[in-house]
Amino acid sequence: MNARQEALAQRLHTVRLRMKAACARAGRPTDSVTLVAVTKTVEPEVAADLLMLGVTDFGENRPQELWRKAAVVPTGRWHLIGHLQRNKVDRTLPLATLIHSVDSPRLLDAIEAEAVRQNRGVGVLLEVNCSGEDAKQGFEPDQVPGLVDKILGLKQVRVRGLMTMAALSEDPEKARPAFRRLGTVAETLRKALAGSPHTVDELSMGMSGDFEVAIEEGATLIRLGTTLVGDLPNP
Ligand SMILES: *Cc1c(COP(=O)(O)O)cnc(C)c1O
Protein backbone atom coordinates (compact mmCIF):
# COMPACT_ATOMS: atom_id res chain seq x y z
CA MET A 1 0.00 0.00 0.00
CA ASN A 2 1.18 3.54 -0.67
CA ALA A 3 1.24 6.28 1.98
CA ARG A 4 -2.20 7.56 1.05
CA GLN A 5 -3.73 4.10 1.21
CA GLU A 6 -2.08 3.47 4.57
CA ALA A 7 -3.55 6.70 5.92
CA LEU A 8 -7.00 5.85 4.55
CA ALA A 9 -6.87 2.37 6.07
CA GLN A 10 -5.93 3.81 9.46
CA ARG A 11 -8.66 6.47 9.37
CA LEU A 12 -11.24 3.97 8.22
CA HIS A 13 -10.32 1.69 11.09
CA THR A 14 -10.79 4.55 13.58
CA VAL A 15 -14.12 5.58 12.04
CA ARG A 16 -15.41 1.99 12.10
CA LEU A 17 -14.48 1.69 15.79
CA ARG A 18 -16.24 4.97 16.60
CA MET A 19 -19.33 3.87 14.63
CA LYS A 20 -19.36 0.56 16.46
CA ALA A 21 -19.08 2.22 19.88
CA ALA A 22 -21.87 4.68 19.07
CA CYS A 23 -24.09 1.82 17.90
CA ALA A 24 -23.35 -0.06 21.12
CA ARG A 25 -24.28 2.97 23.23
CA ALA A 26 -27.56 3.23 21.33
CA GLY A 27 -28.27 -0.51 21.52
CA ARG A 28 -28.23 -0.74 17.74
CA PRO A 29 -26.60 -3.39 15.55
CA THR A 30 -23.37 -2.17 13.93
CA ASP A 31 -24.66 -2.99 10.45
CA SER A 32 -27.64 -0.65 10.87
CA VAL A 33 -25.46 2.33 9.88
CA THR A 34 -23.92 2.80 6.44
CA LEU A 35 -20.85 4.94 5.97
CA VAL A 36 -21.12 7.26 2.97
CA ALA A 37 -17.63 8.56 2.18
CA VAL A 38 -17.92 12.15 0.96
CA THR A 39 -15.30 12.55 -1.76
CA LYS A 40 -16.14 16.10 -2.89
CA THR A 41 -12.68 17.45 -1.95
CA VAL A 42 -10.64 14.64 -3.51
CA GLU A 43 -10.02 12.99 -6.86
CA PRO A 44 -11.79 9.76 -7.81
CA GLU A 45 -8.59 7.77 -7.20
CA VAL A 46 -9.22 8.26 -3.48
CA ALA A 47 -12.70 6.78 -3.87
CA ALA A 48 -11.09 3.85 -5.68
CA ASP A 49 -8.69 3.37 -2.76
CA LEU A 50 -11.59 3.45 -0.30
CA LEU A 51 -13.50 0.95 -2.41
CA MET A 52 -10.51 -1.38 -2.24
CA LEU A 53 -10.58 -0.96 1.56
CA GLY A 54 -14.23 -2.03 1.71
CA VAL A 55 -16.16 1.24 1.49
CA THR A 56 -19.15 0.74 -0.81
CA ASP A 57 -20.95 4.08 -0.71
CA PHE A 58 -19.77 7.52 -1.82
CA GLY A 59 -21.31 10.97 -1.62
CA GLU A 60 -20.89 14.02 -3.82
CA ASN A 61 -22.64 17.35 -3.33
CA ARG A 62 -22.38 18.54 -6.96
CA PRO A 63 -24.13 16.60 -9.71
CA GLN A 64 -21.37 17.16 -12.30
CA GLU A 65 -18.76 15.83 -9.87
CA LEU A 66 -20.91 12.79 -9.17
CA TRP A 67 -21.15 12.10 -12.91
CA ARG A 68 -17.39 12.46 -13.33
CA LYS A 69 -16.37 10.32 -10.37
CA ALA A 70 -19.04 7.66 -10.91
CA ALA A 71 -17.60 7.20 -14.41
CA VAL A 72 -14.16 6.48 -12.90
CA VAL A 73 -15.47 4.31 -10.05
CA PRO A 74 -18.62 2.72 -11.49
CA THR A 75 -18.78 -0.10 -8.96
CA GLY A 76 -19.26 2.39 -6.11
CA ARG A 77 -22.76 3.29 -5.00
CA TRP A 78 -22.96 7.05 -5.56
CA HIS A 79 -25.20 9.28 -3.43
CA LEU A 80 -26.10 12.84 -4.36
CA ILE A 81 -26.03 14.78 -1.09
CA GLY A 82 -26.18 18.39 -2.36
CA HIS A 83 -28.64 20.52 -4.24
CA LEU A 84 -29.88 19.11 -7.55
CA GLN A 85 -30.80 21.61 -10.26
CA ARG A 86 -33.73 20.47 -12.35
CA ASN A 87 -31.74 20.61 -15.60
CA LYS A 88 -29.29 18.07 -14.15
CA VAL A 89 -31.87 15.45 -13.17
CA ASP A 90 -31.65 13.53 -16.47
CA ARG A 91 -27.95 12.72 -16.24
CA THR A 92 -28.05 12.11 -12.49
CA LEU A 93 -30.79 9.47 -12.43
CA PRO A 94 -28.85 6.65 -14.11
CA LEU A 95 -25.84 7.19 -11.82
CA ALA A 96 -27.24 7.94 -8.36
CA THR A 97 -28.10 5.15 -5.94
CA LEU A 98 -29.98 7.60 -3.73
CA ILE A 99 -30.70 11.33 -3.95
CA HIS A 100 -30.53 12.71 -0.39
CA SER A 101 -31.34 16.30 -1.20
CA VAL A 102 -34.91 16.67 -2.47
CA ASP A 103 -35.69 20.11 -1.11
CA SER A 104 -38.77 21.34 -3.01
CA PRO A 105 -42.02 20.02 -4.51
CA ARG A 106 -40.84 21.29 -7.91
CA LEU A 107 -37.71 19.16 -7.74
CA LEU A 108 -39.75 16.13 -6.69
CA ASP A 109 -42.00 16.70 -9.74
CA ALA A 110 -38.98 17.08 -12.02
CA ILE A 111 -37.38 13.86 -10.75
CA GLU A 112 -40.65 11.96 -11.17
CA ALA A 113 -41.17 13.29 -14.71
CA GLU A 114 -37.66 12.30 -15.78
CA ALA A 115 -37.85 8.92 -14.02
CA VAL A 116 -41.07 8.16 -15.91
CA ARG A 117 -39.44 9.28 -19.16
CA GLN A 118 -36.45 6.98 -18.50
CA ASN A 119 -38.71 4.23 -17.16
CA ARG A 120 -36.42 4.01 -14.15
CA GLY A 121 -37.15 3.72 -10.44
CA VAL A 122 -35.30 6.12 -8.16
CA GLY A 123 -34.96 6.35 -4.39
CA VAL A 124 -34.97 9.74 -2.70
CA LEU A 125 -34.73 11.31 0.71
CA LEU A 126 -36.51 14.52 1.59
CA GLU A 127 -34.14 17.12 3.01
CA VAL A 128 -35.53 18.76 6.12
CA ASN A 129 -34.22 21.90 7.77
CA CYS A 130 -34.25 20.86 11.42
CA SER A 131 -31.77 23.43 12.68
CA GLY A 132 -34.01 26.44 12.23
CA GLU A 133 -31.36 28.26 10.20
CA ASP A 134 -32.82 30.42 7.45
CA ALA A 135 -29.92 29.77 5.11
CA LYS A 136 -30.33 26.00 5.11
CA GLN A 137 -31.99 24.25 2.21
CA GLY A 138 -34.77 21.81 2.73
CA PHE A 139 -38.38 21.60 3.80
CA GLU A 140 -39.43 23.00 7.12
CA PRO A 141 -40.48 20.15 9.44
CA ASP A 142 -44.11 21.27 9.43
CA GLN A 143 -44.20 21.24 5.60
CA VAL A 144 -43.50 17.51 5.41
CA PRO A 145 -47.01 16.18 6.22
CA GLY A 146 -48.33 18.38 3.41
CA LEU A 147 -46.25 16.37 0.91
CA VAL A 148 -48.03 13.08 1.57
CA ASP A 149 -50.62 13.39 -1.23
CA LYS A 150 -47.92 14.27 -3.74
CA ILE A 151 -45.76 11.35 -2.59
CA LEU A 152 -48.67 8.91 -2.90
CA GLY A 153 -49.11 9.99 -6.53
CA LEU A 154 -45.51 9.14 -7.51
CA LYS A 155 -45.01 6.24 -9.92
CA GLN A 156 -41.23 5.88 -10.32
CA VAL A 157 -39.87 7.85 -7.38
CA ARG A 158 -39.75 6.05 -4.06
CA VAL A 159 -39.30 7.98 -0.84
CA ARG A 160 -36.87 6.09 1.41
CA GLY A 161 -36.40 8.52 4.29
CA LEU A 162 -35.18 11.94 5.36
CA MET A 163 -31.93 13.89 5.40
CA THR A 164 -30.78 16.84 7.50
CA MET A 165 -27.71 18.97 8.08
CA ALA A 166 -27.13 20.23 11.60
CA ALA A 167 -25.74 23.69 12.19
CA LEU A 168 -21.93 23.68 12.29
CA SER A 169 -20.60 23.80 15.83
CA GLU A 170 -17.56 22.77 17.82
CA ASP A 171 -19.84 20.93 20.21
CA PRO A 172 -21.51 17.83 18.70
CA GLU A 173 -24.16 17.89 21.44
CA LYS A 174 -25.51 21.07 19.83
CA ALA A 175 -26.59 18.94 16.87
CA ARG A 176 -28.61 16.49 18.93
CA PRO A 177 -31.93 18.42 18.97
CA ALA A 178 -31.90 18.71 15.16
CA PHE A 179 -31.22 14.98 14.76
CA ARG A 180 -33.93 14.12 17.24
CA ARG A 181 -36.32 16.40 15.38
CA LEU A 182 -35.64 14.54 12.13
CA GLY A 183 -36.54 11.29 13.89
CA THR A 184 -39.85 12.76 15.01
CA VAL A 185 -40.66 14.07 11.52
CA ALA A 186 -39.79 10.63 10.12
CA GLU A 187 -42.09 8.86 12.55
CA THR A 188 -45.04 11.02 11.51
CA LEU A 189 -44.32 10.54 7.81
CA ARG A 190 -43.87 6.79 8.29
CA LYS A 191 -47.37 6.51 9.71
CA ALA A 192 -48.84 8.60 6.90
CA LEU A 193 -47.15 6.42 4.23
CA ALA A 194 -47.84 3.05 5.87
CA GLY A 195 -49.15 0.52 3.36
CA SER A 196 -47.80 2.52 0.39
CA PRO A 197 -44.70 1.55 -1.65
CA HIS A 198 -42.79 4.29 0.15
CA THR A 199 -40.75 3.77 3.32
CA VAL A 200 -39.15 6.10 5.82
CA ASP A 201 -36.42 3.77 7.05
CA GLU A 202 -33.40 5.87 6.14
CA LEU A 203 -32.18 8.84 8.18
CA SER A 204 -29.20 10.56 6.54
CA MET A 205 -27.62 12.68 9.27
CA GLY A 206 -24.23 13.16 10.84
CA MET A 207 -20.97 14.46 9.40
CA SER A 208 -17.36 14.35 10.62
CA GLY A 209 -18.02 16.55 13.65
CA ASP A 210 -21.24 15.00 14.88
CA PHE A 211 -21.73 11.48 13.48
CA GLU A 212 -21.65 9.69 16.82
CA VAL A 213 -24.49 11.85 18.15
CA ALA A 214 -26.36 11.20 14.89
CA ILE A 215 -25.97 7.44 15.32
CA GLU A 216 -27.24 7.70 18.89
CA GLU A 217 -30.29 9.51 17.48
CA GLY A 218 -31.00 6.90 14.81
CA ALA A 219 -28.92 7.77 11.72
CA THR A 220 -28.78 4.98 9.13
CA LEU A 221 -26.53 6.88 6.68
CA ILE A 222 -23.66 9.04 7.93
CA ARG A 223 -21.85 11.32 5.49
CA LEU A 224 -18.16 11.65 6.33
CA GLY A 225 -15.70 13.83 4.44
CA THR A 226 -12.97 15.56 6.45
CA THR A 227 -12.29 12.86 9.01
CA LEU A 228 -11.72 10.30 6.24
CA VAL A 229 -10.21 12.18 3.32
CA GLY A 230 -9.12 15.58 4.68
CA ASP A 231 -5.42 16.44 4.32
CA LEU A 232 -4.20 13.14 2.90
CA PRO A 233 -0.50 12.44 2.31
CA ASN A 234 0.63 12.06 -1.30
CA PRO A 235 0.66 8.47 -2.52
C1 LIG B 1 -19.31 18.06 2.66
C2 LIG B 1 -20.55 17.42 3.16
C3 LIG B 1 -20.51 16.44 4.15
C4 LIG B 1 -19.21 15.98 4.83
O1 LIG B 1 -18.80 16.95 5.74
P1 LIG B 1 -17.51 16.70 6.69
O2 LIG B 1 -17.73 17.65 7.81
O3 LIG B 1 -16.34 17.03 5.86
O4 LIG B 1 -17.55 15.29 7.12
C5 LIG B 1 -21.70 15.86 4.54
N1 LIG B 1 -22.88 16.22 3.99
C6 LIG B 1 -22.97 17.17 3.03
C7 LIG B 1 -24.29 17.51 2.46
C8 LIG B 1 -21.81 17.79 2.58
O5 LIG B 1 -21.89 18.73 1.63
Image (spheres, rainbow, N blue to C red):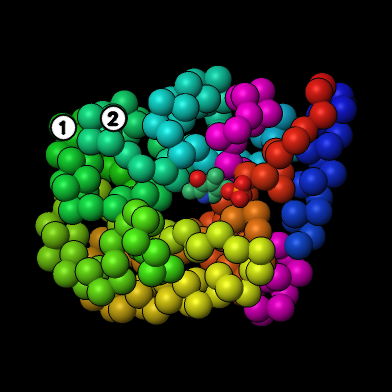
Please identify, in this view, whether the residue under mark 1 or under mark 2 is nearer the observer: 2
Quarter of the image that includes the N terminus: top right
Q: Please give the name of the residue rendered at 22% of the width and 45% of the height, measured from the top-left corner.
A: 107
What type is the residue that disc 1 sits on? Answer: Arg
Instruction: Name the residue rendered at 31%, 50% in the picture.
Output: 102
Q: Which residues are magenta?
A: 19-48
Check residue 69 in the rendering and tell me which mark sits there, or answer none. none
Label 1 sits on a secondary structure element that is: helix
Q: Tell me the residue at 44%/61% (across/down).
A: 164
Rendered location of residue 152, percent (x, y): 16, 62
x, y percent for residue 69: 52, 25
Residue, disc 1 = 117
Q: Do tag 1 and tag 2 residues touch (Cβ < 8 Å)?
A: no
Q: Nearer the viewer, residue 43 or 197?
A: 43
Q: Is residue 168 left or right of residue 10?
A: left
Where residue 91 sits, quadrant-wise, is top left
Identify residue for label 2: 88
Query: Is 32 colored magenta in this rendering?
Result: yes
